[in-house]
Amino acid sequence: MVIVNMYSFLIKDNGPDLDIIITRSMLALAALAAIVYRSDGYYYLSLVASCVLFFLAIFIKMVLVKLRINKLILLSISAFILFVSTHSVAFAVILLVYGYLIKFLVRKPVIEFTNKGIRIKKLLTSPSYQWNEFSNIVFKDNLLTLDFKSNRLLQVSVDDCNSTVDELIFNEFCKEYIKNFGI
């Protein structure tokens, strides 16, 4: 049997943004490196650079979201500050490389509905469920409710800018698959 991806929903992530947490950690480590690997002739410069990097680490969300500064530009400026304070090209390059790699590692969760079942793609895990594990599935007002037969309930908010799914057709699709495969 060929697996056909029939519906796919991008989940709205209401939790802390992992991208911001990782960037904050990298900036805090860069600030620590600016203090630890300073040269004695540039003590005050390293101290100022470390304070600026710690400040950016603390207020990273405000800088990225409210001031609308691109994360890669911010990391480039931070790498330059780190290079000036430590005189180490390696530290600056490592900061830029890790900052760029985050873009490929962090993805929003997606729920895929296929003829074989349902798969929830997350960052680290991708659990799959068969249609016979559900008693009901409902999509209404950008809220997707998965009701398991085991009395477990999963409700997720769907990113409405990516949702072009007709609620009635989707709900009928799920009802039909649960009825046919739920035996």
Image (tube, helix red, strand yellow):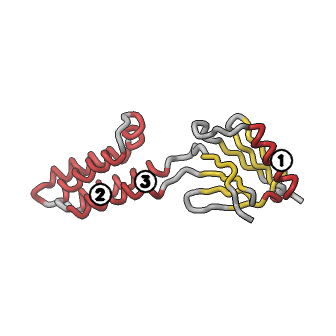
Going from N to C along the chain, the mark reached first, 1 or 3, is 3
Q: Quadrant of the C terminus?
A: bottom right
Q: Dot 2, how many residues are within 10 Å of its Cα: few (below 14), some (14-19), or many (20+)? A: many
Disc 3 is placed on an element classified as helix
Q: In this view, does 97 lie to the left or right of 119?
A: left
Q: 7 and 139: which one is in front?
A: 7
**For residue 67, what is the image quadrant?**
top left
Q: Distance between the residues labelled 1 and 3?
A: 37 Å
Q: Distance between the residues labelled 2 and 1?
A: 56 Å
Query: Residue 139: which numbered mark, if any?
Result: none
Q: Mark 2 points at which residue?
A: 32
Q: In this view, does 19 lie to the left or right of 54?
A: right
Q: How far apart are marks 2 and 3 (CA)?
A: 23 Å
Going from N to C along the chain, the mark reached first, 2 or 1, is 2
Query: Residue 175: which numbered mark, if any?
Result: 1
In front: mark 2 or mark 3? Answer: 3
Q: Dot 3, how many residues are within 10 Å of its Cα: few (below 14), some (14-19), or many (20+)? A: few
Q: In which quarter of the image is the N terminus?
A: bottom right
In front: mark 1 or mark 3? Answer: 1
Q: Mark 3 points at which residue?
A: 103
Task: Judge whether 145 appears above or below 127 on screen.
Answer: above
Disc 1 is placed on an element classified as helix
